[in-house]
Amino acid sequence: MAILTTEGLTYTYSAGTPFEKTAVDHVTLEIGQDQMIGVIGHTGSGKSTLMQHFNGLLQPTEGKVLLSGKDIWADKKMLREVRFRVGLVFQYPEYQLFEETVFQDIAFGPKNMGLSEEEIRRRVLWAADALGLERGLLGRSPFALSGGQKRRAAIAGVMAMQPEILILDEPCAGLDPCGRRLMLQQIGNYQRQSRSTVLLVSHSMEDVAEYTQKLLVMNKGRLFCYGDTSEVFRRAEALREIGLRIPQITSLMLALRQRGYDLPEDIYTVAQAKDALLRLLRREEQTC
Amino acid sequence: MLKDITLGQYFPADSVLHRMDPRYKIIATLLMIVMLFAGNSPWTLAVGGLFVLLAQLLSGIPFRMSWKSLRPILPVLFFTAILNLIFIDGGETLWQWGILKVTEGGIETSIFMFVRIVLLLCGTSLLTYTTSPILLTDAIESLLSPLKRVGFPVHEMAMMMSIALRFIPTLLEETDKILSAQKARGACVDSGKMADRVKALIPVLVPLFVSAFRRAEELATAMECRCYRGGEGRTRLRQLKAAPRDHIALAICLLFLGASLMLNLLKL
Ligand SMILES: Nc1ncnc2c1ncn2[C@@H]1O[C@H](COP(=O)(O)OP(=O)(O)OP(=O)(O)O)[C@@H](O)[C@H]1O
Ligand SMILES: [Mg+2]
């Protein structure tokens, strides 16, 4: 069942001036429950702009955003409620930290929701654990953390609101490869445990191939395609035309196929590739 | 929302006024201010008006731009005009109600003041419309450079001005971003009681200051890495050089000023 739908969503920056720019152009889509959705697109394709409509930070120039079937702009008083149900973590969220301690900063969102002291405490600890923030750090000033720890604290601040939809705009930008992998695993675990929907904006095809079930592809403000990750990557040519590529491992497998090795076409992660190659090698051993 | 605030309101175009030496433009603006304030008869004001109109036409700035810079101040202008109208005594009384009365002198003064301020605003905004902030600070530095002899830090002042101007749009953008991020966490900045609103600003102001200080430090380091040591012995990429046309322009300004002063003397 769909929680969030958009109908002909259009947004124009600086409308009516010479700098007019339509960043999102008639996008109609449905976002369902309990899934991890990757959002990809060339730089400037309107991903961040689209995401800011999902929690009512931007008001559509045209079209509608419906949450559980209700137009979020029908009643402006409802907007705050919408922001608790749809959590948005911006790109480089470190700059939003402001409290005296990490604990208080993560508690900012839940506190705004009007939860009890006890519930806030429970949620803060839960979010910190989910992202692997050690308890010892919670009493420190957020400005005394490392870059990666700051990022985790900022994301925990939104996670602690336990939104039905969590949107992460490039959560791994600027992290080291190990930190990246760990962060994505933690986000994946969070999604499975909470059975909520997570939207992951990313520039890494490898990451979305490994961690998401569905893909939303944006191109020049329009919805290019939206479907199962494996279905989308099958359209390698079309993706290349809009400035995207398929995961490196998929390219490698396709190249091997062209050389006559009997490998399947739909391999998108290193784990799948390993299995397929081992199977191939075993088969060749048997035939020898 | 915050982007609508225009501060360095440079309007790029290619006109005589845009190409004029910014130092001469500043001087011409000062002359214009003298012209408008020295005049005390409709005729001198007409000369000033002609001057502003001429400059406007030469600048290639559309009239609606001037209207845009004028509009926010209009209520204040009307308010002062009404005060003048009511409280200034002189000449025949046309209308009276209690202590409030409208006299001929009052009407004259209020119209006169109104037109003068409008001309002043239009004329001075032409300076910022046709000169980029960087050129403007260069020109101010150059004009104030005689003060260096008495130990006034002219170069440092100008450098501070250009850095400030450079970072205004950046900080506005940053404020917008932080505001959105905190709104996404349920902060309400634009509703509630006054005390609540002030409290709600903390989540925005703290990160803003943190990032402003970080930027300042980074910029200072970058400048030091490039051996910046203040104004001494420093050469410029853009040299301000007066062309013959700048002198002609200045002569025209003086002519206008002379004409308006003459009219003043003749009590026309
Ligand atoms: N505040 C703004 N004012 C005017 N135009 C904007 C603004 N923000 C974005 N744009 C324009 O809207 C378009 C879409 O921008 P958006 O940030 O949504 O892209 P994106 O897909 O998130 O890109 P990236 O992958 O680089 O983050 C771009 O062409 C951009 O120039
Ligand atoms: Mg973006």
Image (tube, coloured by chain):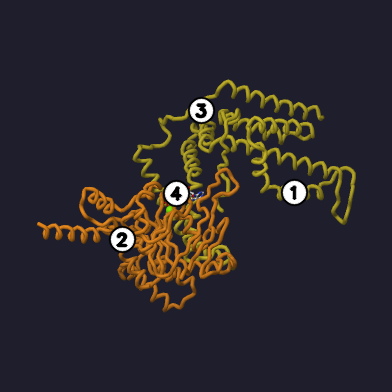
Chain colours: A orange, B yellow
Is residue B199 something that shows in the picture? Answer: no
The percent coordinates of residue B81 (x first, y second) are 77, 47
Task: Tell which tag, 2 or 3, sits nearer the viewer.
Answer: 2
Q: Which chain letter matches label 3? A: B
Q: Rounded to the nearest whole Å, what is the CA distance between mark 1 and mark 4?
A: 46 Å
Task: Tell which tag, 2 or 4, sits nearer the viewer.
Answer: 2
The residue type indicated by label 3 comes to Leu
Q: Secondary structure at mark 2?
A: helix
- Asked if both marks, 2 and 1, belong to the same chain, the answer given is no
Q: Nearer the viewer, residue B83 or A112?
A: A112
Q: Rounded to the nearest whole Å, what is the CA distance between mark 1 and mark 3?
A: 41 Å
Which mark is first along the chain, 4 or 2?
Answer: 4
- Asked if both marks, 2 and 4, belong to the same chain, the answer given is yes
Residue pointed to by mark 3: B240
Q: Which chain letter matches label 2? A: A
Q: Which chain letter matches label 4? A: A
Q: Rounded to the nearest whole Å, what is the CA distance between mark 4 and mark 3?
A: 39 Å
User: Cβ(mark 4) to ligand 1 < 8 Å?
Assistant: yes
Residue pointed to by mark 2: A210
Q: Are marks 2 and 4 in contact (CB under 8 Å)?
A: no
The residue type indicated by label 1 comes to Phe
User: Taking A215 as reference, is A69 above or below it?
Assistant: below
Task: Tell which tag, 4 or 3, sits nearer the viewer.
Answer: 4
Q: Rounded to the nearest whole Å, what is the CA distance between mark 2 and mark 1?
A: 66 Å
Residue A44's disc number: 4
User: Cβ(mark 1) to ligand 1 < 8 Å?
Assistant: no
Residue pointed to by mark 1: B78
- Asked if both marks, 4 and 3, belong to the same chain, the answer given is no
Residue in the picture at 30% in, 53% down: A247
Q: Secondary structure at mark 1?
A: helix
The residue type indicated by label 4 comes to Gly
